[in-house]
Amino acid sequence: MSTENEVELVDAFYMLIESLKNNGIKNIFGIPGIPITALTRSWQADGGKYFGFRHETNAAMAAGASGYLTGVPGVCLTTPAPGFLNGLAGAANATQNGFPMILLSGTAGRRDTDLQKGAFEEMDQLAAARQHVKASYRVNHIEDLPIAMARAVRTAVSGRPGAVYLDLTHEMLTMTLPKAKADELLFTPVDPAPRQPADPAAIKRAVEMLKGAKKPVILLGKGAAYAQCDADIKALVEETGIPFLPMSMAKGLISDHHPLNAGAARSYALPECDVCLIIGARINWLLGHGKGPTWGNKLKKFIQVEIKADEIDSNVPVAAPVVGDIASVVAQLREGLKGMPKADAEWVGGIQSRVNASKEKLAPTLVKETAPGMMNYRNSLGAVRDVLAKYPETILINEGANALDNTRMIVDMTLPRKRLDTGTWGIMGMGMGSCIGATVATGNAVVAVEGDSAFGFSGMEVETIARYKLPITVVVMNNGGIYKGNEENAGGFDDPSISSFTPGARYDMMMTAFGGVGVSVDTPAALAAAIEEGIKSRKPTLINAIIDPDAGVESGRISNLNIERKKKA
Ligand code: ADP
Ligand code: TZD
Ligand code: MG
């Protein structure tokens, strides 16, 4: 702020910071540099919380995680071109997953960029962003900042949430405005994520279908977790007595221990059901595209509760589309279903007995002893499960292949929005950024279960975790490689195989290097003790969990699929 001829002037930083505050933004995740260093400093000087990362993709992952957990868009701030592109990877992931966030990036001067004169960090960022985010806007004038921010926030949180890119041009960032004019322009948007109740006719259709169902199931996706109407969803399940299955990030929306949780009998419940009520999940690859063996090779009667109308019929015909926001629709459905008799006892009992059988089969493998250094995914994660059961508020971040699949199966969640993972893209590298975003957004302690490969994508952020003294405990499932640590060079040569890493790597020393706590463990008991200490102490902790290099399996092996196809042909 400065005075000139008695008129008080404000700069673009002031306008931007006030606009962020007006929209309820409290944290910025990013890396400074030309031309946004001073902006970042002004944000901090103004009392805003800033988290400085080591790579922008991780900062954007933090923003996405924060947006998902709170419904307020997370904000990532980057420098032009390379910084922007790094951030864009995280913004694209947020868009794929339906997490609200805003990517802000400075640019090189438009005059030079548009004529490709070779400016420092020259790039047409608006065009690059466009296909990877929900919307992208360029701010060419300081006066437009309040409107630009409102548009960004409204776009990020309304309808299907996603990432929005705001292009902050170099020219705009150097503009000033009389303060009186600026304060006239600043505003707080009203109701950025409006409720959208469904058409009563659509509700009626869905209600009739549920009333006529003999073997109904309810599928809950991360959209249902995001909607934050947990009690209503639980009531819908309990009032109807219909078994439910959570998608991975919806685990805990209703406790995994709930008697109607059919998750462990998925391979019976989905093929056998006649009507499937889907709340906040896309019928994508994670659901076998709604057809094939996952569904017993039969077309089910799908009732899909979804905010984005053009998601309906994206893979298979949906018999009863219910377009609206989940909180409104679930209330409407409960009203319509009042007095409906509970789901058929034989159907529910059949599912429950299969759930119990599958849990009984799994149980002994979770506590089986192994020789030191030979832990497998079952007994190590059995230990993780037992510790987390004592601290249900802990947020679990999870990525990897075996490290992901086994954790999802073994580690129960009992509270909503306590699990974030590789999501819709199956992306490695969401780990450390999501840990930071999750604890910053909620204040809760975080435990990350990471494949050693998965961890490597964002591993340098352990320095960020240590620097900000965040209550994050990272467990690196160290099997020495991608899927397995004992693969040999396919040509028999001396250099490493395609999937193996340094044998005996000590990931724990990465955390001690920055003053945090590092522990290396090779038994389930030691792993459990180290996690518990990490959660209780709230100290940045990294646990190197030594797993038998031969314990994992390779997922989705194309050559195996080809063999299957040849067999069929
Ligand atoms: P999962 O990966 O858990 O199966 P998806 O991300 O595929 O879940 O699907 C979530 C769906 O929920 C998306 O299609 C999204 O549009 C929808 N959605 C998100 N928030 C809401 C909401 N408040 N109301 C209705 N639908 C929503
Ligand atoms: N790059 C990115 C960004 N995402 C990916 N999903 C992959 C690469 C490919 N990929 C997987 O799909 S899983 C995986 C990779 C590299 C790592 C699996 O190894 P891990 O887990 O060590 O993390 P396990 O426990 O050894 O199976
Ligand atoms: Mg591994």
Image (cartoon, rainbow, N blue to C red):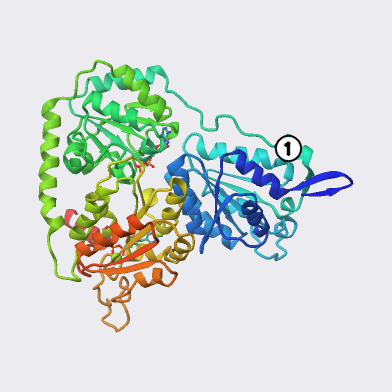
The quarter of the picture where residue 148 lies is top right
Q: Residue 542 at what x, y percent from top left?
A: 35, 64
Q: Is residue 281 left or right of residue 180?
A: left
Number of numbered discs visible in the structure rendering: 1
Residue projecting furthest to the right: 5
Q: Residue 488 at what x, y percent from top left?
A: 25, 76
Residue at 41% across, 66% down: 516
Q: Is residue 420 visible?
A: yes
The quarter of the picture showing ligand 3: bottom left
- Which element is circle 1 on? helix
Q: Residue 141 at what x, y percent from top left?
A: 73, 45
Q: Relative to 497, does residue 294 appear above or below in the rendering?
A: above
Q: Which residue is mark 1?
A: 183
The quarter of the picture where residue 509 lies is bottom left
Residue projecting furthest to the bottom: 494
Q: Relative to 180, does residue 168 appear above or below in the rendering?
A: below
How crowded is the residue under tag 1: few (<14 C-alpha within 10 Å), some, or many (20+)? some
Observer-nearest residue: 349 or 564? 349
Q: Is mark 1 within 8 Å of ligand 1?
A: no
Observer-nearest residue: 22 or 558? 22
Q: Relative to 327, does residue 563 appear above or below in the rendering?
A: below
Observer-nearest residue: 95 or 77? 77
Q: Quadrant of the C terminus?
A: bottom left
Q: Residue 281 at what x, y percent from top left?
A: 35, 38
Residue projecting furthest to the top: 339
The quarter of the picture where residue 269 lies is top left
Amino acid type, callout 1: Asp
Residue projecting furthest to the front: 537
